[in-house]
Image (tube, rainbow, N blue to C red):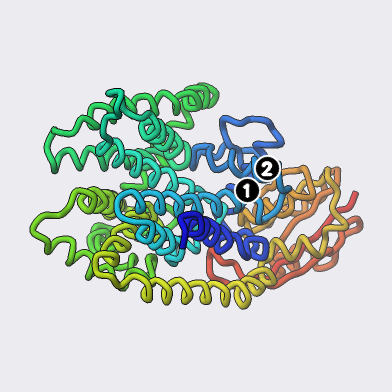
Amino acid sequence: MTFWRRLALAVLFPLLLHFTGTWALPLLDRDEPRFAEATREMRAGGDWLVPHFNQHYRFDKPPLTYWAQALSIQVFGESEAAVRLPSVVASALTSLVLFLWGRRVASEITGLNAALIFATALQVLIHSKQAVADSLLVLSITLGAWAGWEMMNQKRGTGGGRSLLFPGLFVAALALGFLAKGPLGWLPFGMIALFRFRRGPVNPAWPLAGWLFLLALALVALWGLPALLSTHGEYWREGIGRHVIARGFTTFEGHGGGGIGIYLALLPFYCVTVFASFFPWSIWLPGLIRQSWSRKETDALTGYLLGGVILVFGIFTFYKTRLPHYTLPAFPFLALLLAREWSRLGRSAHLLRRGVLGMTALLGLVIVLVFPVLRRTNPARQLLGQVAGALKPEMEFASVEYEEPSLVWYFRSRVNGYFSSLPAEEIPGYMAKPGPRFCVLPVAVANHLFPTLPPGLQQAGEFSGFNVVHGRRVDLRLIIKPD
């Protein structure tokens, strides 16, 4: 197989794998609709510095994901597939980086194997089809780690200088990583620092990395300073203080449990969940780690990659908020480590083929069997399908008890008004206000509030479905005031 065919396989196969089915799956609460709706409001309002969701500030993440989704929508139109496309492309580009990195440190086969191992890991398959920030973060970290490695091993050219390619990529990766998901995007700088600590202050890349880090920080400041000024510092207090620092000390949305006993019991959380998240390749992780540490002297690249893995797992092990996908940034390093080890042992071909074909078949079954069920049972999307013809752009809308962001994303594709979450007792007054509007109520609440509908109100839709976030069935009714 030629270089160009391997390159095409390393990029086009992940691209097709991750894109397939993105149009068939409704946006799943909660993060996907939040990102998608914030992107819509960013495009509509013209504020490219600070994202908003439902007309309120959304400080959860910096703006790179919203910018990428806005570009995708501009080109392909507003749809589930369009807002997921940046994640698809980012994951495919991560596979490309692994191919090029593996080719330079070992062989084209090693690079191709690393690209395909990463692309078909279970958690990568899941997050590459989601309209969230993780895939862009993983791409930035992988690119920065590769650039950092090349900087540390770069030889002077015939003219006595050094190529600016990898320092430039390093700066861009650090800046984009922060703009994707905050300080975790600076992990490649931490990898170089850890490598220097282990190997001693002999590598000239260390002082260069420090200057490049400052340059990346300056690039981030081109967005950060205006964003902080426009929000009077609230972006920093909420985006960094609450959504980064506070997550380390408190559980967010119930992820991680409470109490010191549960915290200590969950310390090995990622050492266990990695076997599901990195499946099927996690089967070979114990052997990989044993082989890596059993050698008398770990080679430099293995130490560098293991340093990245240790940093990711170390940071999130002591984080109090825990989710299985938090360790995704370590997966490219694990993929490259595994591909190199298999190349040494001469056993990559049949293992890789079986793993890739198995995960591709599994994904195909999920797309064919599960995606249609999720689409038919998504309450917001199905209610919209029932009442779309009766909606008017000037309408406002509200709900009782059902407050999922998908309700905002799907219905604001047809109306310009914003969403209100109200207690049940305020609904009659809300629906009596002048102007067209509608509300979404649990059927039991609707029967209690409106045993018979007053003049001017109509029952426009009713649907029973499944609330994925809370894991329970919901029975909803949509009542509309047309004029």
Which residue is under mark 2?
40
Q: Nearer the viewer, residue 299 or 176?
A: 299
**Can you say whether 143 is above or below 348 in the image?**
above
Q: Residue 251, position in %: x, y?
A: 37, 53
**Can you say whether 118 is above or below 174 in the image?**
below
Residue drawn at x 70%, y 53% is 79
Query: Residue 369 is drawn in which quadrant?
Result: bottom right
Q: Nearer the viewer, residue 124 or 305?
A: 305
**Can you say whether 52 is above or below 479 in the image?**
above
Q: What secondary structure is found at the residue carrying circle 1?
A: helix
Q: Is 141 displayed left or right of 267 in the figure?
A: right
Q: Do the residues labelled 2 and 1 touch (CB within 8 Å)?
A: yes
Q: Is 128 displayed left or right of 48 in the figure?
A: left
Q: What secondary structure is found at the residue carrying circle 2?
A: helix
Q: Nearer the viewer, residue 103 or 49?
A: 103
Q: Residue 15, position in %: x, y?
A: 56, 57
Which residue is under mark 1?
36
Tell how many labels. Answer: 2
For mark 1, does the 10 Å Cα neighbourhood hold few (<14), some (14 to 19), or many (20 or more) residues?
Answer: many
Q: Residue 403, position in %: x, y?
A: 62, 56
**Can you say whether 212 is above or below 348 in the image?**
above
Q: Nearer the viewer, residue 144 or 4?
A: 4
Q: Residue 322, position in %: x, y?
A: 36, 57
What amino acid is labelled 1 in the image?
Answer: Ala
Using the numbered discs, state the Cα–Cα distance from disc 2 to disc 1 in whole angstroms: 6 Å
Residue drawn at x 70%, y 65% is 445
Q: Can residue 323 be seen in this snapshot?
A: no
Residue drawn at x 21%, y 30% is 204
For mark 2, does the 10 Å Cα neighbourhood hold few (<14), some (14 to 19), or many (20 or more) residues?
Answer: many
Q: Can residue 59 be seen in this snapshot?
A: yes
What amino acid is labelled 2 in the image?
Answer: Arg
